[in-house]
Image (tube, grey):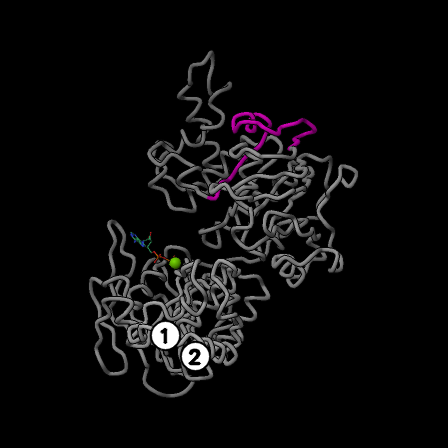
């Protein structure tokens, strides 16, 4: 780095990565990256999805070998060929998907794979050591508990403890807050401060500006595999960081008129459904969405969000309960019947479920309308009408594609997303189910998507917005229902919602204990 930034404590970096390049087939994930890390600092690694953050850290943690570049620890060149090499050098990483053994205890997981462990380890001594570390860093967890008994947030603490137990001096956390409630995020902040206070260094991967500001001393911004800037956090701001991350100016606020909800459109009553493993995913879930409103669904990932979208769009059978759309029973409808009932669906998996990559943009856009006039007449597809139809949507939604005939797989993520959005909104007559609609989009495309959702609402449609981004829900939704273990824990009007209340519901607190929160409707009368 040549930007002249001095560390808070003037000293040489403890770690220097120089010219790191890493290619995957067809992708230059890291392009000659330089990165410095100082003792006792929290360095945020900020970038959009796909910017190359995880790749760079996997190189540092010994999972990937770079195609070029060097790593210096202090003044020494180091080769990091495996996670074990990294651990010996005092470098450890908590990955996005945890790597714990569910059938073993916390303590067993922490010592698992440690090189100089005696054949019969003194478990009591290990428990004592773990408890001491727990208290020292505020990472509260019972060393004798089994991993399967722990919440995701607790499992993350175990991963961090594991690094500390091994004496790591450089801790890498890959998007640690994605699986946490707002309260747990705050606790993580205290842990980072305690770790940092002992002179250890932390690299914190995120794509959220707020976390950079709250937690880091410096921030390194990656875009398309390159470092675009490194700043002292105190000397920058969210707007500048967003511009660096995305490559242009970004607006954060969208104006929103108050909702004017009409008749009830979607009713779920005591719905139970299993997940793919055959375990209960939705448990007696009840909710209503009215025309002219956006009901947001909040919750830590994996609490039934996916299954909820699937039962409403006919992709998953329910075991008990009822689904009504427009007052009509749609309990065991097929996806096609749901489309015919006016349900649009922006799926989480855009390349898999949302689009056919090899098919032209025009055909992807027509996928839901081709069965009926004007695109088909007497069962015959009208090519020129499909093209005209596609051109109008491409223009209306600002989809950037060379031609309507270009295969959709050649478009950027944002434009694939807009293609799905255009198709689903066009085909959606009454209810739009949007699942993580802005995931992976740059800030500009995110704003466009949010505006479209509000337009749908204002046109009198009902919108169910499932999101992992609380800020998005607070900006766009009119009411927020919080999912926890397949149940609606409570419903909060956005106007009076605060992050703390939503966070408590996300961690399973009962609505009755909180002010201004309604329980989920459990009887027809309550609708
Ligand atoms: N194991 C892999 N094989 C092929 N491509 C990969 C692999 N890991 C990452 N990529 C690609 O490299 C680029 C950077 O990915 P990643 O480092 O995961 O980004 P980030 O963590 O910033 O979201 C992306 O285009 C991604 O698709
Ligand atoms: Mg990543």
Q: Residue at x 73, y 35 (%)?
A: 263
Determine the quadrant in which ligand 2 lies: bottom left
Q: Which mark is residue 121?
A: 1
Q: What quarter of the picture does the C terminus occupy?
A: top right
Can the viewer see residue 344?
yes
**Residue sitting nearer the eye, 142 or 431:** 142
> Which residues, given as a range, are shown in magenta?
323-348
- Judged from the image, the secondary structure of the residue bearing numbered disc 1 is loop
Whether ligand 2 has any atom under 8 Å from the Cβ at mark 1 is answered as no
Q: Which mark is residue 125?
A: 2
Q: Could you tell me if the residues under marks 2 and 1 are in contact, i.e. CB atoms within 8 Å?
A: yes
- Asked where in the image residue 512 lies, by quadrant, the reply is bottom right
> Most extreme residue toward the right, as rendered?
525
Whole-percent x, y for residue 158 in the image: 46, 68
In the picture provided, is 195 more to the left or to the right than 114?
right
Whole-percent x, y for residue 185 in the image: 54, 67
Whole-percent x, y for residue 132 in the image: 49, 80
**Magenta span contains residue 345:** yes
**Residue sitting nearer the eye, 405 or 321:** 321
Q: Residue at x 38, y 34 (%)?
A: 356
**Magenta span contains residue 228:** no
Q: What is the distance, in whole Å, between disc 2 and disc 1 at their CAs?
A: 9 Å
Q: Which mark is residue 40?
A: none
Q: What quarter of the picture does the N terminus occupy?
A: bottom left
**Residue sitting nearer the eye, 203 or 478:** 203
């Amino acid at each position: 780095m040549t930007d002249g930034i001095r560390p808070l404590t003037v000293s040489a970096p403890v770690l220097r990565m120089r010219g790191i390049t890493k290619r995957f087939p067809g992708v230059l994930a890291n392009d000659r990256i330089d990165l410095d890390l100082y003792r006792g600092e929290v360095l945020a690694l900020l970038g959009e999805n796909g910017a190359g953050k995880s790749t760079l850290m996997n190189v540092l943690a010994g999972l990937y070998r770079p195609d070029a570049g060097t790593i210096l620890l202090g003044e020494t060149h180091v080769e990091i060929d495996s996670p074990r090499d990294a651990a010996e050098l005092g470098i450890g990483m908590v990955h996005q998907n945890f790597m714990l053994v569910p059938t073993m205890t916390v303590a067993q997981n922490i010592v698992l794979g440690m090189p100089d462990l005696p054949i019969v380890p003194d478990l009591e001594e290990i428990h004592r050591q773990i408890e001491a570390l727990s208290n020292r860093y505020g990472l509260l967890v019972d060393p004798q508990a089994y991993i399967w008994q722990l919440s995701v947030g607790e499992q993350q603490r175990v991963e961090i403890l594991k690094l500390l137990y091994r004496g790591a001096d450089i801790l890498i956390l890959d998007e640690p807050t994605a699986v946490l409630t707002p309260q747990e995020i705050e606790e993580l902040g205290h842990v980072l401060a305690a770790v940092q206070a002992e002179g250890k260094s932390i690299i914190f991967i995120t794509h959220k500006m707020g976390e950079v500001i709250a937690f880091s001393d410096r921030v390194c911004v990656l875009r398309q595999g390159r470092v675009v800037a490194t700043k002292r956090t105190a000397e920058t701001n969210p707007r500048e960081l967003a511009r660096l991350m995305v490559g242009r100016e970004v607006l954060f606020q969208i104006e929103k008129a108050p909702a004017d909800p009409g008749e009830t459109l979607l009713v779920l009553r005591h719905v139970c459904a299993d997940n793919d493993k055959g375990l209960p995913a939705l448990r007696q879930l009840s909710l209503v969405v009215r025309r002219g409103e956006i009901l947001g669904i909040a919750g830590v990932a994996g609490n039934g969000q996916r299954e909820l979208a699937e039962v409403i769009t006919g992709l998953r059978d329910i075991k008990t309960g009822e689904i009504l759309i427009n007052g009509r029973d749609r309990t065991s409808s097929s996806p096609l019947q749901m489309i015919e009932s006016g349900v649009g669906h922006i799926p989480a998996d855009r390349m898999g479920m949302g689009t056919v990559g090899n098919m032209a943009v025009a055909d992807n856009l027509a996928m839901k309308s081709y069965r009926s006039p004007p695109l088909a007449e007497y069962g015959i597809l009208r090519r020129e009408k499909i093209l005209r139809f596609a051109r109008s949507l491409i223009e209306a939604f600002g989809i950037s594609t060379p031609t309507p005939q270009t295969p959709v797989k050649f478009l950027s993520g944002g434009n694939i997303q807009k293609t799905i959005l255009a198709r689903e909104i066009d085909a959606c007559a009454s209810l739009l189910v949007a699942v993580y609609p802005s995931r992976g989009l740059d800030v500009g495309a995110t704003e466009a998507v949010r505006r479209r959702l509000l337009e749908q609402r204002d046109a009198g449609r009902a919108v169910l917005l499932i999101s992992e981004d609380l800020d998005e829900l607070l900006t766009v939704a009119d009411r927020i229902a919080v999912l926890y273990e397949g149940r609606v824990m409570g419903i909060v009007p956005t106007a009076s919602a605060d992050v703390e209340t939503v966070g408590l519901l996300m961690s399973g607190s009962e609505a009755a204990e909180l002010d201004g929160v309604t329980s989920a409707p459990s009887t027809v009368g309550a609708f």
